[in-house]
Image (cartoon, grey):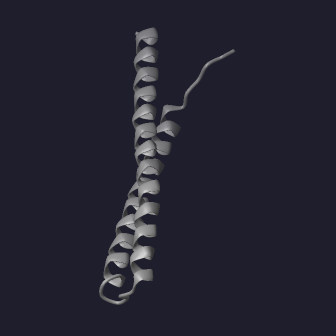
Amino acid sequence: MELSFDTEQGRNMGRKMISTMDAVDRLIKAIETAANTLVGAGWIAPAANAFKEAITAWLGQIRPIVTQMRDLKVRLDHEITEWETTANTLEG
């Protein structure tokens, strides 16, 4: 079995991961801001509080996924570095 790793493709994947994480972070903040604006100002009722609690719970599920994605990006960066270090050692 021949091993290979196109590290430039790996870097491209890393850039896509970063842009996706940034987009998700922006969406999370936008949803959180909109919910805070709606509940307590635009919607005052027990159902509004329940809705805000549901949004908060949902955000609590999304944030760990973004953290996992950040961890995967760190892992990818490490794999690229390890691959290139090994390749340079073998070539050198």
> Residue at 59% of width from left, 23% of height from top?
4
Viewer-proximal residue, 63 or 22?
A: 63
> Residue at 55% of width from left, 27% of height from top?
5
Which quarter of the rendered picture does the C terminus lie within? top left
Q: Position of residue 56 (x, y in %)?
A: 40, 65
Q: Quadrant of residue 69?
A: top left
Query: Up-down: is 38 above or below 87?
Result: below
> Residue at 50% of width from left, 37% of height from top?
10
> Given the current orientation, which residue lies at the most extreme front position?
46
Viewer-proximal residue, 53 or 73?
A: 53
Q: Quadrant of residue 41?
A: bottom left
> Given the current orientation, which residue lies at the most extreme right position?
1
Query: Up-down: is 77 above or below 42?
Result: above
Q: Position of residue 63 (x, y in %)?
A: 41, 53
Q: Position of residue 44 (x, y in %)?
A: 35, 88
> Residue at 50% of width from left, 44% of height from top?
13
Which quarter of the rendered picture does the N terminus lie within? top right
Query: Up-down: is 52 above or below 58?
Result: below
